[in-house]
Image: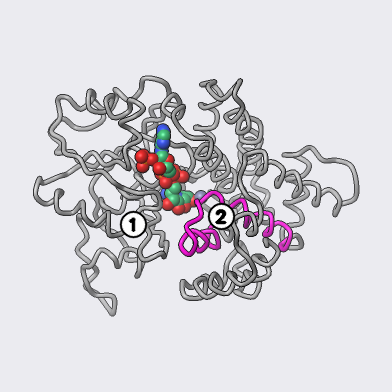
Amino acid sequence: MLNFNFQNPTKIHFGEGQISVISKEVPLDARVLLVYGGGSIKGNGVYKQVIDALSEHTFFEFSGIEPNPTYDTLMKAQEIIKRENIDYLLAVGGGSVVDGAKFIAAAALYEGNDEGINAGSDPWDILAKQQVITKALPIGAVLTLPATGSESNGNSVVTRDGIKLPFSSPLVRPLFAVLDPSVTLSLSDRQISNGVVDAFVHTIEQYLTYSVNGKVQDRFSEGLLQTLIEEGPKALLPETKENLEVRANIMWSATMALNGLIGAGVPQDWSTHMIGHELTGAFGIDHARTLSIVLPAVMKVRKGQKREKLLQYAARVWRITEGDENTRIDKAIRLTEEFFETMQVPTRLSDVDLANKDIDLLIERLGQHGMTALGEHSDITLEISRELLTQAL
Ligand code: NZQ
Ligand code: ZN
């Protein structure tokens, strides 16, 4: 096992009816900015529950954070933050809203780094120059879409001019997060699928690398993968889709998949995500749908480097015990693709109308963004990324 430092201070309030706890979690003297997206929370009763819980608080609203939140939209929040002396953010929505709140929180107190060549106080530098954040407004979250783990991690992804850039800081990790599985009942099949697949791929990116004998991490990951494989399809079937236990298991899996626990002390890959971000940036494909296209190709092209873990994945997650090693690995990859198909997400670039001619742009962008040494061995060069994308056609 590798050395690690692990701390996850986000307090989780899980279960039906828990939104009311925000009345106690948000300090009474705070000046709160409630941030949300395009309005789904108004249709499913979440907004009303939040407003009721904040009845004793002073709060303002900022809405319109779009899926794959943009820098331009997020910067608009700075005006109300200054005007109303906001000192607390409450994010209510999916990963985009929570990620957006994180950038707003960091940008609000960003003073820049006055040392060296990166001097300047433009919040864009947080993303473009990966400036270290020293202050951020506190954030609470009410999660409405289980997928990203953003509700209890310090990561955020922001888009500007079709380019997705991540940043990370423990200072933007939500102080608390409410996870009420019943609020996920209003999600479309597409968003449920996206969430299950995103959580699945988060787990794989921290598991399917090379063994460092991290038995706890491996078995936690295998448990999450099996839970998502079992419960994900049930959330799409008419007879089980309203089942709150199904929703609860998916919701907790998604949080656990990216709250830092399973990734502590083990190598991590993230090549599928980095290539996927370019697919979203260039062609607007949903985040999870980029992952379901790229991951099978990564498994196939990186079979040699991931051999030991692919065999473990085949045996423990899919219970494949028959056949020689190559047969078992190929079967595990095929079952992964079939799982994605059951979840109604694409597994090929051609499924989203992309072809060989589109690969050049993706490779160019990967190069521009410094994504030239990806994967757990930092050896996925642009040439190998091209091979991966060609495999995914
Ligand atoms: O905007 P509203 O009206 O709320 O509608 C949203 C949005 O249109 C809707 N929705 C959310 N909850 C709902 C609902 N509709 C009905 N009922 C509900 N309960 O769903 C749509 C998609 O929401 P979005 O927040 O974009 O989805 P998701 O949670 O998948 O977040 C995706 C974003 O997270 C980033 C992605 O890159 C993408 O920008 N990621 C963040 C990560 C992190 N912070 O650690 C890691 C991930 O790998 C990912 O990169
Ligand atoms: Zn993801």
Most frequent secondary structure within the magenta stretch: helix
Q: Amino acid at mark 1?
A: Thr
Residue 70, label in figure: 1
Q: Which quadrant would the C terminus be assigned to in this image?
A: bottom right
Label 1: few (<14), some (14–19) or many (≥20) C-alpha neighbours in 10 Å: many
* Disc 2, SS: helix
1 or 2: tag closer to the N-terminus: 1
Residue 108 quadrant? bottom left
Picture coordinates of residue 16, whole percent (x, y): 41, 20
Can you give x and y, in whole percent of width and height, for residue 79 in the image?
Answer: 14, 53
* Amino acid tagged 2: Thr
Seen in the picture, residue 136 relative to 354 is either above or below; the reply is: above
Whether pointer 1 and pointer 2 mark residues with C-beta atoms closer than 8 Å, the reply is no
Camera-side residue of 390 and 88: 390
Residue 365 tag number:
none
Q: Which residues are magenta?
A: 273-302
Q: Is residue 342 above or below residue 304?
A: above
Q: Residue at x 51, y 21 (%)?
A: 244
Query: Which residue is painted at 32% across and 50% down in the image?
Result: 100
| In the image, farthest residue toward the bottom | 117
Residue 387 drawn in magenta: no
The residue most toward the front is 353
Q: Which residue is mark 2?
A: 290
In the displayed structure, 275 sits above or below 286; it is: below
